[in-house]
Image: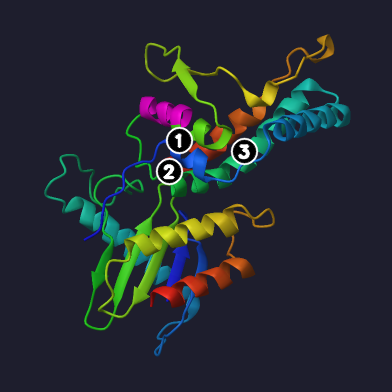
Amino acid sequence: MSRVVGPRSGDAIFASVERVNAELFTLTYGAIVRQLLTDLEEVDEVNKQLDQMGYNIGIRLIDEFLAKSNVTRCVDFRETAEVIAKVGFKMFLGVTASVTNWDADGTCCSIVLEDNPLVDFVELPDTCQGLYYCNILSGVIRGALEMVSPL
Amino acid sequence: MMYMFNRNGVCLFYREWNRPLRTLNPQQDHKLMFGLLFSLKSLTAKMDPTSAEKGNLGVPQLPGQGCSFHSFRTNTYKLSFMESPSGIKIILVTHPRTGDLREALKYIYNLYVEYVAKNPVYAPGTPIKCELFNTNLDQYVRSIS
Protein backbone atom coordinates (compact mmCIF):
# COMPACT_ATOMS: atom_id res chain seq x y z
CA MET A 1 0.00 0.00 0.00
CA SER A 2 1.50 3.33 -0.88
CA ARG A 3 0.79 6.56 0.92
CA VAL A 4 -0.36 9.47 -1.19
CA VAL A 5 1.83 12.42 -0.29
CA GLY A 6 0.19 15.83 -0.52
CA PRO A 7 2.02 18.99 -1.57
CA ARG A 8 4.63 20.08 0.96
CA SER A 9 4.54 23.58 2.31
CA GLY A 10 7.19 26.06 1.28
CA ASP A 11 8.50 26.39 4.81
CA ALA A 12 9.16 22.71 5.20
CA ILE A 13 11.11 22.51 1.98
CA PHE A 14 13.00 25.71 2.60
CA ALA A 15 14.16 24.30 5.88
CA SER A 16 15.39 21.13 4.26
CA VAL A 17 17.36 22.44 1.26
CA GLU A 18 20.89 23.80 1.42
CA ARG A 19 21.04 27.55 1.70
CA VAL A 20 23.60 30.21 0.89
CA ASN A 21 24.25 33.36 2.81
CA ALA A 22 21.64 36.00 1.94
CA GLU A 23 24.12 38.82 1.69
CA LEU A 24 26.38 36.81 -0.58
CA PHE A 25 23.40 36.19 -2.83
CA THR A 26 22.36 39.84 -2.87
CA LEU A 27 25.86 41.11 -3.51
CA THR A 28 26.50 38.55 -6.24
CA TYR A 29 23.32 39.56 -8.01
CA GLY A 30 24.21 43.21 -7.65
CA ALA A 31 27.62 42.53 -9.14
CA ILE A 32 26.04 40.70 -12.07
CA VAL A 33 23.73 43.60 -12.85
CA ARG A 34 26.57 46.08 -12.47
CA GLN A 35 28.74 44.11 -14.86
CA LEU A 36 25.94 43.77 -17.39
CA LEU A 37 25.42 47.52 -17.30
CA THR A 38 29.10 48.13 -17.90
CA ASP A 39 29.26 45.62 -20.74
CA LEU A 40 26.04 46.40 -22.52
CA GLU A 41 25.41 50.03 -21.57
CA GLU A 42 21.87 50.02 -22.96
CA VAL A 43 19.23 49.56 -20.27
CA ASP A 44 16.96 47.64 -22.65
CA GLU A 45 19.73 45.25 -23.56
CA VAL A 46 20.41 44.58 -19.91
CA ASN A 47 16.73 43.93 -19.29
CA LYS A 48 16.66 41.46 -22.16
CA GLN A 49 19.79 39.73 -20.97
CA LEU A 50 18.47 39.38 -17.43
CA ASP A 51 15.27 37.92 -18.81
CA GLN A 52 17.22 35.43 -20.91
CA MET A 53 19.34 34.39 -17.96
CA GLY A 54 16.21 33.94 -15.89
CA TYR A 55 14.65 31.87 -18.66
CA ASN A 56 17.62 29.49 -18.72
CA ILE A 57 17.42 29.14 -14.96
CA GLY A 58 13.66 28.62 -15.05
CA ILE A 59 13.65 25.70 -17.46
CA ARG A 60 15.83 23.73 -15.05
CA LEU A 61 14.37 25.09 -11.85
CA ILE A 62 10.93 23.71 -12.66
CA ASP A 63 12.11 20.11 -12.30
CA GLU A 64 13.65 20.81 -8.94
CA PHE A 65 10.50 22.58 -7.84
CA LEU A 66 8.26 19.73 -8.95
CA ALA A 67 10.47 17.08 -7.43
CA LYS A 68 10.70 18.72 -4.03
CA SER A 69 7.25 20.15 -3.61
CA ASN A 70 4.95 17.38 -4.87
CA VAL A 71 2.37 19.80 -6.22
CA THR A 72 -0.17 18.40 -8.61
CA ARG A 73 -1.08 20.13 -11.82
CA CYS A 74 -2.80 23.49 -11.27
CA VAL A 75 -6.24 23.75 -12.84
CA ASP A 76 -6.26 27.44 -13.67
CA PHE A 77 -4.16 30.53 -13.70
CA ARG A 78 -5.25 31.69 -10.25
CA GLU A 79 -4.01 28.51 -8.67
CA THR A 80 -0.78 28.73 -10.65
CA ALA A 81 -0.14 32.26 -9.39
CA GLU A 82 -0.88 31.23 -5.82
CA VAL A 83 1.46 28.26 -5.99
CA ILE A 84 4.26 30.36 -7.48
CA ALA A 85 3.86 33.04 -4.84
CA LYS A 86 3.39 30.85 -1.80
CA VAL A 87 5.37 27.70 -2.44
CA GLY A 88 7.84 28.67 -5.14
CA PHE A 89 9.16 31.90 -3.79
CA LYS A 90 9.20 30.55 -0.27
CA MET A 91 11.15 27.51 -1.33
CA PHE A 92 13.83 29.27 -3.33
CA LEU A 93 14.12 32.73 -1.81
CA GLY A 94 12.71 32.23 1.63
CA VAL A 95 10.19 35.05 1.29
CA THR A 96 6.48 34.76 0.64
CA ALA A 97 4.91 36.86 -2.05
CA SER A 98 1.31 37.97 -2.25
CA VAL A 99 -0.91 37.92 -5.30
CA THR A 100 -2.95 41.06 -5.93
CA ASN A 101 -4.45 43.22 -8.67
CA TRP A 102 -6.47 40.62 -10.45
CA ASP A 103 -8.04 42.04 -13.56
CA ALA A 104 -11.61 41.37 -14.66
CA ASP A 105 -10.80 38.32 -16.79
CA GLY A 106 -8.53 36.68 -14.29
CA THR A 107 -5.71 36.67 -16.83
CA CYS A 108 -3.47 39.30 -15.29
CA CYS A 109 -2.23 39.75 -11.74
CA SER A 110 0.60 41.22 -9.72
CA ILE A 111 2.87 39.20 -7.50
CA VAL A 112 4.25 41.47 -4.83
CA LEU A 113 7.37 40.70 -2.79
CA GLU A 114 7.35 42.50 0.53
CA ASP A 115 11.01 42.09 1.32
CA ASN A 116 12.83 41.14 -1.80
CA PRO A 117 16.28 39.75 -1.00
CA LEU A 118 17.64 40.83 -4.37
CA VAL A 119 17.21 44.54 -3.70
CA ASP A 120 18.77 44.86 -0.25
CA PHE A 121 21.28 47.72 -0.16
CA VAL A 122 20.45 48.70 -3.75
CA GLU A 123 19.83 52.20 -5.06
CA LEU A 124 19.28 52.94 -8.72
CA PRO A 125 21.01 56.07 -10.04
CA ASP A 126 19.22 58.40 -12.46
CA THR A 127 21.12 57.04 -15.44
CA CYS A 128 19.38 53.70 -15.01
CA GLN A 129 15.75 54.67 -15.05
CA GLY A 130 13.82 52.01 -16.88
CA LEU A 131 16.07 49.22 -15.68
CA TYR A 132 14.04 46.23 -14.47
CA TYR A 133 16.41 45.27 -11.70
CA CYS A 134 14.61 42.04 -10.86
CA ASN A 135 13.94 41.03 -14.42
CA ILE A 136 15.72 37.78 -13.77
CA LEU A 137 12.75 36.73 -11.64
CA SER A 138 10.31 37.28 -14.45
CA GLY A 139 12.58 35.28 -16.74
CA VAL A 140 12.64 32.43 -14.23
CA ILE A 141 8.86 32.36 -14.01
CA ARG A 142 8.56 32.50 -17.79
CA GLY A 143 10.98 29.59 -18.28
CA ALA A 144 9.43 27.47 -15.58
CA LEU A 145 5.86 27.96 -16.77
CA GLU A 146 6.83 27.27 -20.35
CA MET A 147 7.99 23.79 -19.40
CA VAL A 148 4.65 22.90 -17.85
CA SER A 149 2.46 24.58 -20.41
CA PRO A 150 0.17 22.48 -22.58
CA LEU A 151 2.11 23.03 -25.79
CA MET B 1 16.23 -1.51 -17.41
CA MET B 2 15.33 2.12 -17.39
CA TYR B 3 14.29 4.73 -19.93
CA MET B 4 13.84 8.47 -19.54
CA PHE B 5 12.01 10.66 -22.03
CA ASN B 6 11.29 14.35 -22.17
CA ARG B 7 8.03 15.90 -23.27
CA ASN B 8 8.99 15.86 -26.95
CA GLY B 9 9.79 12.17 -27.09
CA VAL B 10 13.54 12.61 -27.07
CA CYS B 11 15.05 9.68 -25.21
CA LEU B 12 17.21 11.32 -22.58
CA PHE B 13 18.55 8.23 -20.96
CA TYR B 14 18.60 4.48 -21.34
CA ARG B 15 20.24 1.98 -19.05
CA GLU B 16 20.03 -1.78 -18.81
CA TRP B 17 21.16 -3.99 -16.01
CA ASN B 18 19.80 -7.34 -17.01
CA ARG B 19 18.33 -7.69 -20.48
CA PRO B 20 18.72 -11.13 -22.04
CA LEU B 21 16.93 -10.48 -25.34
CA ARG B 22 17.04 -7.48 -27.61
CA THR B 23 14.67 -7.47 -30.56
CA LEU B 24 14.90 -4.01 -32.14
CA ASN B 25 17.64 -1.52 -32.82
CA PRO B 26 17.87 1.24 -30.17
CA GLN B 27 16.13 3.96 -32.21
CA GLN B 28 13.11 1.82 -32.92
CA ASP B 29 13.08 0.59 -29.37
CA HIS B 30 12.89 4.14 -28.01
CA LYS B 31 10.24 5.20 -30.48
CA LEU B 32 8.17 2.15 -29.70
CA MET B 33 8.41 2.78 -25.98
CA PHE B 34 7.43 6.41 -26.26
CA GLY B 35 4.55 5.64 -28.60
CA LEU B 36 3.33 2.92 -26.30
CA LEU B 37 3.27 5.21 -23.29
CA PHE B 38 1.61 8.03 -25.15
CA SER B 39 -1.19 5.77 -26.33
CA LEU B 40 -1.57 4.05 -22.97
CA LYS B 41 -1.89 7.33 -21.17
CA SER B 42 -4.49 8.51 -23.62
CA LEU B 43 -6.41 5.25 -23.40
CA THR B 44 -6.43 5.04 -19.63
CA ALA B 45 -7.63 8.62 -19.35
CA LYS B 46 -10.48 8.07 -21.79
CA MET B 47 -11.59 4.84 -20.13
CA ASP B 48 -11.69 6.42 -16.70
CA PRO B 49 -15.12 5.76 -15.20
CA THR B 50 -14.79 8.36 -12.45
CA SER B 51 -13.71 11.45 -14.32
CA ALA B 52 -16.35 13.75 -15.78
CA GLU B 53 -14.37 15.64 -18.35
CA LYS B 54 -12.86 13.86 -21.30
CA GLY B 55 -11.54 15.26 -24.52
CA ASN B 56 -11.97 13.54 -27.84
CA LEU B 57 -9.89 10.47 -28.48
CA GLY B 58 -6.55 11.45 -29.89
CA VAL B 59 -6.32 14.81 -28.15
CA PRO B 60 -3.04 14.86 -26.21
CA GLN B 61 -3.46 14.88 -22.46
CA LEU B 62 -1.53 17.25 -20.27
CA PRO B 63 0.91 15.44 -18.01
CA GLY B 64 -0.66 15.06 -14.61
CA GLN B 65 -4.19 15.87 -15.66
CA GLY B 66 -6.91 13.29 -15.35
CA CYS B 67 -6.03 9.80 -14.26
CA SER B 68 -2.63 8.39 -15.10
CA PHE B 69 -1.51 4.81 -15.16
CA HIS B 70 1.55 3.86 -13.17
CA SER B 71 2.41 0.28 -14.00
CA PHE B 72 1.48 -2.79 -15.98
CA ARG B 73 2.56 -6.37 -15.56
CA THR B 74 2.94 -9.28 -17.93
CA ASN B 75 4.03 -12.81 -17.14
CA THR B 76 7.67 -11.96 -17.84
CA TYR B 77 8.14 -8.36 -16.71
CA LYS B 78 6.61 -5.41 -14.93
CA LEU B 79 6.78 -1.89 -16.34
CA SER B 80 6.48 1.09 -13.95
CA PHE B 81 5.98 4.61 -15.18
CA MET B 82 6.04 8.10 -13.74
CA GLU B 83 5.47 11.43 -15.41
CA SER B 84 6.20 14.86 -14.00
CA PRO B 85 4.11 17.90 -14.95
CA SER B 86 7.09 19.17 -16.90
CA GLY B 87 6.87 16.15 -19.18
CA ILE B 88 9.81 14.12 -17.89
CA LYS B 89 8.82 10.44 -18.09
CA ILE B 90 10.66 7.72 -16.21
CA ILE B 91 10.13 4.06 -17.04
CA LEU B 92 11.47 1.08 -15.17
CA VAL B 93 11.17 -2.47 -16.49
CA THR B 94 11.71 -5.10 -13.80
CA HIS B 95 10.89 -8.70 -13.01
CA PRO B 96 7.21 -9.42 -12.46
CA ARG B 97 7.20 -9.81 -8.71
CA THR B 98 8.49 -6.30 -7.96
CA GLY B 99 6.35 -4.28 -5.57
CA ASP B 100 5.02 -0.79 -6.16
CA LEU B 101 7.86 1.29 -7.50
CA ARG B 102 6.30 4.74 -7.32
CA GLU B 103 8.50 5.85 -4.45
CA ALA B 104 11.55 4.57 -6.29
CA LEU B 105 10.59 6.48 -9.41
CA LYS B 106 10.16 9.63 -7.37
CA TYR B 107 13.56 9.10 -5.85
CA ILE B 108 15.08 8.67 -9.30
CA TYR B 109 13.40 11.88 -10.40
CA ASN B 110 15.04 13.63 -7.45
CA LEU B 111 18.38 12.18 -8.48
CA TYR B 112 17.81 13.52 -11.98
CA VAL B 113 17.14 16.95 -10.53
CA GLU B 114 20.27 16.88 -8.44
CA TYR B 115 22.72 15.71 -11.05
CA VAL B 116 21.23 16.73 -14.36
CA ALA B 117 18.96 19.73 -13.95
CA LYS B 118 21.50 21.46 -11.78
CA ASN B 119 24.38 20.61 -14.07
CA PRO B 120 25.58 23.72 -15.91
CA VAL B 121 27.06 21.82 -18.83
CA TYR B 122 23.88 19.91 -19.59
CA ALA B 123 21.67 21.32 -22.35
CA PRO B 124 17.99 20.56 -21.68
CA GLY B 125 16.50 18.29 -24.30
CA THR B 126 19.68 16.41 -25.11
CA PRO B 127 20.64 12.89 -23.99
CA ILE B 128 22.13 12.71 -20.53
CA LYS B 129 25.81 11.91 -20.34
CA CYS B 130 26.65 12.59 -16.73
CA GLU B 131 28.88 10.18 -14.83
CA LEU B 132 27.69 11.20 -11.38
CA PHE B 133 24.09 10.57 -12.38
CA ASN B 134 24.99 7.11 -13.73
CA THR B 135 26.93 6.14 -10.63
CA ASN B 136 24.29 7.26 -8.20
CA LEU B 137 21.57 5.65 -10.20
CA ASP B 138 23.41 2.32 -10.29
CA GLN B 139 24.00 2.48 -6.55
CA TYR B 140 20.37 3.19 -5.86
CA VAL B 141 19.08 0.46 -8.14
CA ARG B 142 21.40 -2.12 -6.61
CA SER B 143 20.21 -1.15 -3.19
CA ILE B 144 16.55 -1.70 -4.00
CA SER B 145 16.81 -4.87 -6.10
* Residue corresponding to mark 3: A55
State how far apart marks 1 and 2 are (Cα).
8 Å
| Contact, mark 1 vs mark 2 (Cβ under 8 Å) | yes
State how far apart marks 2 and 3 are (Cα).
20 Å
The quadrant of the rendering that contains the C terminus of chain A is top left
Residue lying farthest to the right in this orientation: A38
Identify the secondary structure beneath mark 1: helix
Residue lying farthest to the left in this orientation: B49
Nearer to us: label 1 or label 3: 1
Q: Chain of mark 1?
A: A
Placement of A146 over or under A131, stated as above or below: below
Instruction: Name the amino acid type tagged 3.
Output: Tyr
* Residue corresponding to mark 1: A10
A81 falls in the magenta region? yes
Residue A115: x %, y % from top left: 59, 19
Q: Is residue A102 left or right of residue B56?
A: right
Residue A17: x %, y % from top left: 54, 45
Number of marks drawn: 3
Residue B113: x %, y % from top left: 53, 54
Give the quarter of the image for residue A107: top left
* Residue corresponding to mark 2: A69
Nearer to us: label 1 or label 2: 1
Q: Is residue A74 left or right of residue A46?
A: left
Can residue A146 be seen at all in this image of the molecule? no
B51 falls in the magenta region? no
| Contact, mark 2 vs mark 3 (Cβ under 8 Å) | no
| Closest to the observer, A4 or B85 | A4
Residue lying farthest to the bottom in this orientation: B20
Q: Residue at x 46, y 64 (%)?
A: B4
Q: Residue at x 44, y 39 (%)?
A: A12
Identify the secondary structure beneath mark 3: helix
Nearer to us: label 2 or label 3: 2
